[in-house]
Image (spheres, grey):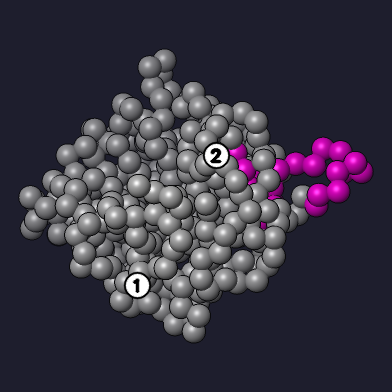
Amino acid sequence: MLLSLGSNGNFQLGLNNDEDVYSPQIVPFDRAIEKISCGGNHTLLLDEDSQLWACGDNRKGQCGYEVKEPLYNPLSPDYLRIFTRVSHERWVFLTCGWEFSVIVHADRRRVCSCGEGLSGELGQGNRSNSQGLREIDIPYLDDKEFIIDISAGLRHWICVTNEGNLYGCGDGRKGQLGPVVMKTVNKVSFLGRIEHAQAVVCGVQFSAVLQETGHVIVLGGEKWNVAAECDAWQANNSELSSSICSISANWSTLSLLSTEGCVYAFGRCDRAQKAHTKASDIVQIASGTEHNILRTKKGSVLIYGWNEHGNASNDDKRDVYDAKTLQLPGWAYIVAAGYATSWIVIEENHK
């Protein structure tokens, strides 16, 4: 069962209405879910068969949904009110920025983008808008290289390969694409190599790469001291640093999750972005614009941070400074967060 809450002015919660929601609501989607990613006002997911579905704002083509015969198709392509199948192909990764999406094919080598990218984030050269999924070229991949993770920020994205190579495009003016590309680029560029890289996340003006050793390398991040705080913490806590197993990024805050289930956060904290629980049983953290949602070993869910649209489940719209437990009708096994949206996938009869 899929649940959603938060900002919904463009049908991005998949509830067949455009009203903001302050508590988890059941989404009319009956397939098992593997992955969820959220953009400014659109949402993508991969189902159990690795097929792509989308809902929300599609005016810039960011859902990848095209109406090829509009006279015979009554569904408006501008807004997808419920989750609609976009492609029958198989995909493995997906990530969304403000008004664009990037999806990785099941072969982990082919990449498609769609939507609008005024800062080059589509990776389609001078083309800044694509109404449908369009394959983009990553000319640097060798025969044995494949993508193992991908993430998008507001106007940039980065993927990392099994060889530790980083590729990406979009806005790199604040160092978020790394020191090699300190500019805006509209074609996928080689950004550098990080030994034993296994995951990447993107904020607005920074990106971060997790190595197999638990060490985290921050690209950009001068604003809000994301890089400085993270680097200092790692230098002073080498044993804890080596236990980091997952990372997550808000627009301006970086969170790290350890194998012991603890969360450590760096950067901005004006909207309770660091108000994480003291619990030590966290197994997943998902970061939205400026709020976070945590999943515990026991299948419960905690949420905190910015709450203007009810995305942190306070109906008074006040930010949540003490992580609160959501009341759910089942055991949570996936959490996701977007641009003022929150998502939980639950199993009702978990044993």
Q: Which residue is drawn at 13% across and 46% down?
A: 242
**In screen coordinates, is 232 left or right of 15?**
left
Front in this rendered view, residue 334 or 197: 334
Magenta span includes 270: no
Q: Which residue is drawn at 33% across and 27% down?
A: 162
Amino acid, disc 2: Asp
> Mark 1: which secondary structure?
strand
Amino acid, disc 1: Lys
**Vertical order, 326 against 73 (above or below):** below
Q: Residue at x 39, y 59 (%)?
A: 287
Circle 2 packing at 10 Å, graded few (<14), some (14-19), many (20+), is some
Q: Earlier in the sequence, mark 1 or mark 2?
A: 2
Q: What x and y, as percent, mark residue 24?
A: 51, 66
The residue under label 2 is 47
> Mark 2: which secondary structure?
strand
Q: Which image quarter: residue 223? A: bottom left
**Vertical order, 271 against 44 (above or below):** below
Give, as a single range, the part of the protein colored magenta: 52-76
Q: Which residue is drawn at 23% across and 40% down?
A: 211
Name the main secondary structure of what is drawn in magenta.
Answer: loop
Front in this rendered view, residue 4 or 172: 4
Disc 1 to disc 2: CB gap under 8 Å: no
Circle 1 packing at 10 Å, graded few (<14), some (14-19), many (20+), is some
The residue under label 1 is 324
**Vertical order, 307 against 163 (above or below):** below
Residue lying furthest top in this view? 143
